[in-house]
Amino acid sequence: MSQTIKAGLVGVTGYTGMELARLMIHHSSMELVRVTSRSEAGKTLADIYPFLNRLPLGNLVITQPDPKDLAEECDVVFLAVPHKTAMEIAATLLEEGVKVVDLSADFRINDKATYEQWYDVEHTRSELLTEAVYGLPELYLDQIMGARLIANPGCYPTSSILGLAPALTNKFIETDDIVIDAKSGASGAGRGAKVGSLFCEVADSFKAYGLPSHRHTPEIEQEISKLGKTDITVSFNTHLLPIDRGILSTIYTKLTADTSLDDIHTAYTEFYAGKPMVRVLPKGQLPETRFVRGTVFCDIGLVVDPRTNRLIILSAIDNLCRGASGQALMNANLICGLDIDEGLPMAPMMP
Amino acid sequence: MSQTIKAGLVGVTGYTGMELARLMIHHSSMELVRVTSRSEAGKTLADIYPFLNRLPLGNLVITQPDPKDLAEECDVVFLAVPHKTAMEIAATLLEEGVKVVDLSADFRINDKATYEQWYDVEHTRSELLTEAVYGLPELYLDQIMGARLIANPGCYPTSSILGLAPALTNKFIETDDIVIDAKSGASGAGRGAKVGSLFCEVADSFKAYGLPSHRHTPEIEQEISKLGKTDITVSFNTHLLPIDRGILSTIYTKLTADTSLDDIHTAYTEFYAGKPMVRVLPKGQLPETRFVRGTVFCDIGLVVDPRTNRLIILSAIDNLCRGASGQALMNANLICGLDIDEGLPMAPMMP
Amino acid sequence: MSQTIKAGLVGVTGYTGMELARLMIHHSSMELVRVTSRSEAGKTLADIYPFLNRLPLGNLVITQPDPKDLAEECDVVFLAVPHKTAMEIAATLLEEGVKVVDLSADFRINDKATYEQWYDVEHTRSELLTEAVYGLPELYLDQIMGARLIANPGCYPTSSILGLAPALTNKFIETDDIVIDAKSGASGAGRGAKVGSLFCEVADSFKAYGLPSHRHTPEIEQEISKLGKTDITVSFNTHLLPIDRGILSTIYTKLTADTSLDDIHTAYTEFYAGKPMVRVLPKGQLPETRFVRGTVFCDIGLVVDPRTNRLIILSAIDNLCRGASGQALMNANLICGLDIDEGLPMAPMMP
Amino acid sequence: MSQTIKAGLVGVTGYTGMELARLMIHHSSMELVRVTSRSEAGKTLADIYPFLNRLPLGNLVITQPDPKDLAEECDVVFLAVPHKTAMEIAATLLEEGVKVVDLSADFRINDKATYEQWYDVEHTRSELLTEAVYGLPELYLDQIMGARLIANPGCYPTSSILGLAPALTNKFIETDDIVIDAKSGASGAGRGAKVGSLFCEVADSFKAYGLPSHRHTPEIEQEISKLGKTDITVSFNTHLLPIDRGILSTIYTKLTADTSLDDIHTAYTEFYAGKPMVRVLPKGQLPETRFVRGTVFCDIGLVVDPRTNRLIILSAIDNLCRGASGQALMNANLICGLDIDEGLPMAPMMP
């Protein structure tokens, strides 16, 4: 690829926007040429993010979000704005001929009614739902490469679906008894100023939240139902960890037969052969969120409990990177004809 | 009670020993008169724990563990030493006429063979297993009050059993499909110098460990089988939180019928009526480990998920206080004829 | 004291209000009978602070702040509201015959002009400045015991002044070359919803802030000038620690002569004899914020550096307890004729 | 450079060894071909560092440290072993014709006697002290490019010297009144299994340590004395932060004249012109350790306090990256003829 891809980012002030800016520093084939924010327009990126001081990207001036301008300057645009806000911007940009990677939930749910029920807003651009491609590259690589509009997966769904996919396609597990106990770092709650997100409310504590009906439930059920070729209802439950980044999902399933850990491990390894961003760990190893920090890796550990005939799947990602902006960049690379891993860090931050 | 109870503590250098010392500062009817440690004998408590500087307890000189001396000076002795080490000391002290609260696992498992299988050591004092009382006051108050030897419950079992007890005795849930997803703070790993417990290995990360056969499994199964009046096998799985103190257990169960949250909440409230150290939270509230930090409270939250007909029970304790030394003190109070809550802090550390 | 003191608390939703509520749980001679908040009136304390569930204090209903009502029901009122707001409430309550412990800065600065310059507001009740007693019990015990209005010291000043007092009264140090490098936990920034106080902005990082003119500077200079009997200007500089509670001040001074550590340590020990809440550590020991967590202790460590002829003083407190609500309670005890330490926890939270 | 540089690493199990391995993942012109450890020889890197799973570097087998073998296979060798151990290995490798970057203190101190006094061991290879180049590229670029043996600077000295250099060369400050109040993350204490480094001993607390004579003192004094062209004695004092990575040094100095912040800021900017890894922050901005996390940036903030006529310099680095392995890689790049920044991450980990 001799020509640099020009990218735009709508909504730069949240953690996913910040993460995308961070990732673009090392991308040699794609350049961020537009970043927008209603509240911070006029400032440079370094003004709001001092970690970008003295880096070329730090000099980029934040603008008001203007679809015409974005369309003129950009080949691809990332939407890092809340659901409902994203759908109209996406539609306008597509009309202007720009490719879109939407990090919100607006185009993830295929069924308009399901979306409206769980997100409690009207979907005004449902005509795009069939065109949008669910941007999980390990499952939809070909469709992504030909897409104009990517529905970038949610953080929890990414971890859950990648963890369950080989077990479901291999029919190792019962489909009516799946429990996902998911734990996420605090950046998943966003950068809004809320008392509940203050350091003194989160540090040195742990809690569950949002039970029993987190909004990521229908997204998970939609995708694992396709994989399992049957309608699946899951018990999906979320917890808040006192860490910045990281999701660990502990997934409890019942084996349909007396399948051995060896067989399951082999099937997982085969399923993810040629997909190096999912790392099926050696038997006996369990994932830790720090091992994927700052990367797009999804680490999967497998445990068979013979006492209860359960398969327990542990799946770890960085919620901001693989769970949002890093995966968005994988998708942008693909729809722009680049290698999937261009610009992506492979070196987890340890410690 | 006009006379002060004299207490001894064998093994003061670990976190449970430290916690017991901390709790004794405010106890007006019981006094710590002996503390022992093989490695630190000769020093004062304040020498090894500077937080005790200028407090009377800080002047107490650490001695070598000598059963005769302990028996002469103490009415009750706490054992905060590893399993296997505890059983012989307990037996000797009992012979000398001293009451014993054993914080190790040595007398928790009623069945010798089960103990030996899970802990991989021989039980050389199994004749005491029938006499030992499992020190969970909400379940065994009367037996505790008359006991000489208390098997102080493990941290995870305390949280799990208190969370499940009303559901089991009321037959709300299936007994063959219970999953306990437990998360503990780092003090649960002890004060031994291990790389895996270093700040830089634990902070800013999260992982599961010990799957699928944590040693607390048989203790949980023994007690909930009694409550459910049937042999129960659970899937019990543990995780390490980057916090000092606190356990949150998320317990997944299947309802036997279409029981409402209202009915379940009422049953829980009735079960724990008159037992103020277990707090059944108002419907809609979920426990957080910080709300019990430094106390013996066990906070229980209840969620019914109608989509999967599951009852999800959330149970939070402080692993060092209710899960170890605080509960040991409740038990010591009871076997010494004091009120159960004497000397115990009721004010959680917030934030 | 046979009769229970009735106390009120204006402003219960911040961290100092929360801390005062927490401390009152164990106070046997003083009872919180009124708590006020404009935003949360009508709820119970347990509604906003679930850690108070099932405790009697949790049932207290929050009211609108009404001086008449407070005066009718309370013997003493704590003001945990921002500066400027406090001065009028204090004046009204005093007129109604109620004793006041003001946790804000409004009555700490003796000089009206200095207050107005640093806090950038008009002082409308300056007639009370001479009456108000600076509530640092180790320095002003007698005045406090006879006072109606206590100006409760700031957190940083408490740590700084207690650290410097013996060195100044003994003329060990030059008064024109004092540098205070102070570090505080995040609760010092308050419970307001600000992006800068979010977990993800504070955790895993460290910074200085407010340089070179933190508002606590004139308060420190006023008090140490009195101790040194000369006008002292200090370099006072603050940093934000990723911990909930705790201040450590590292105070750099120059020795006036070749005074030995022995002599200095003896002088400090004598200065604080009979004042057990200040703990002069044994030579060679340095304070750690965890050793005072949750208590009113001020731990002081002393270092003499012969290479530079400096005395380095390390002073640690819990910013919420000794630095705010715990000290307020010491003062309230004193002005109500109780022992200074009634109801105060002496057992630091470790770990 | 068409040919890949082959590098060796002696001592891979500590945090600096781990960090160097992490950094090499993205280096395209240098390859790690040998890693050694006495305790872990025979395992692969991924065996001990699961974060390297599925990365080519993870397959590298750890060997026993053998100078002949290292010399045969490597163009340059990094020594990440303790002081005293390093000096002999360095000498042997140099004799074999290999370039050496020594991360220990063994060749940092020019004067043998000073080294032996502060480190309390004999220097058996002092003949190399004159040849060794102090590897601070902003000060010694030319010497480094021609060197065979690099004494890689200590973490605290890097932050202190870079912070002070422009002030000293411009004679802005008094040289007899410099106080450095330095704070470091816990990785600086190393990966040894010590109780004092446990999560529960470090988290949620803050303390000073090593006062008044930290071993980095002579290294700082040596370099700033050269810059100030006079013998300088500093008061250098260290604290332990509950974070993984990061050093912030708050440096207190007295201005020699009424120099304005503008003039000082200009001089700093000019001093570091063309040296983009030191970022002099815009006036009014102060550094935060998170803004440099995972990078070799040194961020410098400047404050003039007119009340005390002090210049306060704030200097932040990542202690593992700029303070150790990242700077080692800068030096290795330079002595191998590569660009200084090859392979180095420029994107700080935020949050």
Image (tube, coloured by chain):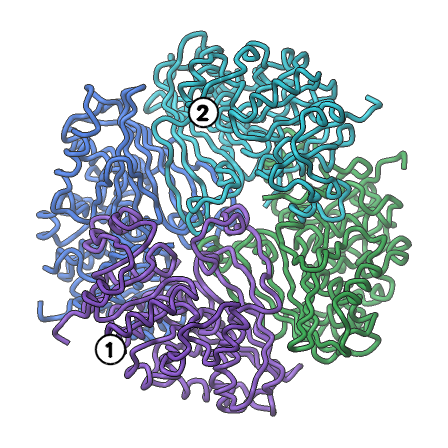
Chain colours: A green, B purple, C blue, D cyan
Question: Whole-Å distance between the Cαs marked 1 and 2?
Answer: 56 Å
Q: Are marks 1 and 2 on the same chain?
A: no
Residue at horizontal 32 percent and vertical 32 percent from the top: C180
- Please provide percent x and percent y for residue D248: 47, 33
Identify which amino acid the numbered label 1 is placed on.
Answer: Asp
Whether residue B90 can be seen here: yes
Give the numbered dot on residue D221.
none
Residue at horizontal 41 percent and vertical 38 percent from the top: C239
Residue A227 occupies quadrant: bottom right
SS at badge 1: loop
- Front one among A276 and C8: A276
Circle 1 chain:
B
SS at badge 2: loop
Identify which amino acid the numbered label 2 is placed on.
Answer: His
Give the numbered dot on residue D216.
2
- Please provide percent x and percent y for residue A248: 63, 60
Above-or-below relation of D171 to D43: above
Mark 1 vs 2: CB contact within 8 A:
no
- Front one among B176 and C58: B176
- Please provide percent x and percent y for residue D68: 70, 24
Residue D78 occupies quadrant: top right
- Please provide percent x and percent y for residue A307: 64, 77
Around disc 2, counting alpha carbons within 10 Å, would you say few (fewer than 14), some (14 to 19), or many (20 or more)? many
Around disc 1, counting alpha carbons within 10 Å, would you say few (fewer than 14), some (14 to 19), or many (20 or more)? some
Above-or-below relation of A342 to D126: below
- Front one among B289 and D77: D77
Give the numbered dot on residue B339.
1
Circle 2 chain:
D
Left or right: A253 as drawn, with respect to D84: right
Left or right: C268 as drawn, with respect to B43: left
Left or right: D29 as drawn, with respect to B64: right
Residue at horizontal 80 percent and vertical 26 percent from the top: D4
